[in-house]
């Protein structure tokens, strides 16, 4: 039986609501047919926890299994989060009867309060002036979250959500570059208070002075020296030569990077990758002498 069909008055007695006013039950409105549903989606790999009014909402990020709309790029996925019926029935304590009642709430307004509590409109592209913002860093509409009356959403809705997120991330990176040159103390303060700077750098694959990519070293099986983990070739610092992983993939990577030429590949060891890639065009190589 659905909770919306419960017609009994439960023998509950508490003073938790309404101060000293006591109530003796919860009455549910009859089941109703929603006019439509409002759907929340996320286009970011980032997840958000405990957001929104009333009951806290968790918004998972995009995963590999999420769909891509026809005509969009493979990395432009969207993640379905939740749906809400229009209208929503919100609980309200009656001051006269000391019982719980329900009021009808526009589901679009409820969902917008989850996505951006400062936006008094229903348009996610609305820019709220700084002097009218009452919350801090709670605008999820610029971080990949959006709502739609369609499931699946339209290509325009997904594209708009991505555009808002990328515009926000670009603005953060530009601000970080400016502060790095003019006010490093302020930059440290901004980075500490807003994790979105790191998400922006990660999204665009940008390496900043405050967001260095970490790479653990490993011992090269060929020369015994330390090298970046997974590197197909590296410079032996002690002897000064380019050490190439003794595999076809290693020599291919070195030649494609221009530090070696195909003439340098040791013959008779099965390292000639171009002989294995039959039907594939030969790789472009730089002119001039090989780098030793």
Image (cartoon, rainbow, N blue to C red):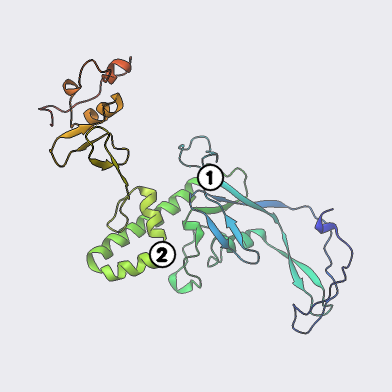
The residue at the point 52 percent across, 42 percent down is 155
Q: In the picture, residue 269 is in which quadrant?
A: top left
Which residue position holds label 1? Answer: 78
Residue 24, compared with residue 75, is above or below; it is below
Q: In the picture, residue 113 is in which quadrant?
A: bottom right
Residue 265, compared with residue 136, is above or below; it is above
Q: Residue 24 placed where, x, y %? A: 86, 74
Q: Residue 223 placed where, x, y %? A: 21, 34
Marks 2 and 1, how far apart in space? 24 Å
Q: How many marks?
A: 2
Q: Residues within 10 Å of mark 1 (few under 14, many from 20)?
A: many
Q: Is residue 179 left or right of residue 171?
A: left
Q: Residue 95 placed where, x, y %? A: 79, 79
In the image, farthest residue toward the left:
289
* Mark 2 touches mark 1? (CB < 8 Å): no
> In which quadrant will I find the C terminus?
top left
Q: Residue 248 placed where, x, y %? A: 29, 24
Q: Residues within 10 Å of mark 2 (few under 14, many from 20)?
A: few
Secondary structure of the residue carrying numbered label 2: loop
The numbered mark at residue 139 is none
* Of labels 2 and 1, the one closer to you: 2
The residue at the point 39 percent across, 49 percent down is 203
The numbered mark at residue 194 is 2
Residue situated in front as seen by the camera: 109 or 238: 238
Q: Earlier in the sequence, mark 2 or mark 1?
A: 1
Secondary structure of the residue carrying numbered label 1: loop
The residue at the point 62 percent across, 66 percent down is 53
Q: Is residue 234 left or right of residue 124?
A: left
The residue at the point 63 percent across, 58 percent down is 108
């Amino acid at each position: 039986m659905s909770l919306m069909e419960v017609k009994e008055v439960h023998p509950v007695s508490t003073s938790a609501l309404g101060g000293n006013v006591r109530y003796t039950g919860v009455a549910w409105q009859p089941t109703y047919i929603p006019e439509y549903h409002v759907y929340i989606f996320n286009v970011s790999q980032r997840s958000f926890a405990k957001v929104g009014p009333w009951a806290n909402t968790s918004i998972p990020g995009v995963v590999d299994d999420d769909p891509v709309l026809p005509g969009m790029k493979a990395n432009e996925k969207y993640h379905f989060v939740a749906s809400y019926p229009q209208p929503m029935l919100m609980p309200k304590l009656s001051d006269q009867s000391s019982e719980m009642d329900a009021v009808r709430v526009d589901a679009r307004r409820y969902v917008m309060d989850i996505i951006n509590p400062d936006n008094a409109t229903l348009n996610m592209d609305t820019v709220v002036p700084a002097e009218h913002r009452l919350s801090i860093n709670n605008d999820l509409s610029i971080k990949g979250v959006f709502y739609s009356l369609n499931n699946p959403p339209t290509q325009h809705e997904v594209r708009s959500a991505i555009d808002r997120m990328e515009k926000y991330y670009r603005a953060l990176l530009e601000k970080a570059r400016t502060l790095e040159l003019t006010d490093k103390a302020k930059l440290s303060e901004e980075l500490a208070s807003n994790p979105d700077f790191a998400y922006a750098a990660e999204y665009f694959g940008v390496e900043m002075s405050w967001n260095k990519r970490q790479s653990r070293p490993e011992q090269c099986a060929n020369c015994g020296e330390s090298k970046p983990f997974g590197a197909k070739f590296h410079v032996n610092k002690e002897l000064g030569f380019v050490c190439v992983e003794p595999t076809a993939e290693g020599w291919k990577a070195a030649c494609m990077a221009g530090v070696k030429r195909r003439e340098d590949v040791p013959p008779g060891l099965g390292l000639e990758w171009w002989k294995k890639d039959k039907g594939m065009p030969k790789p472009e190589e730089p002119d001039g002498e090989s780098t030793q």
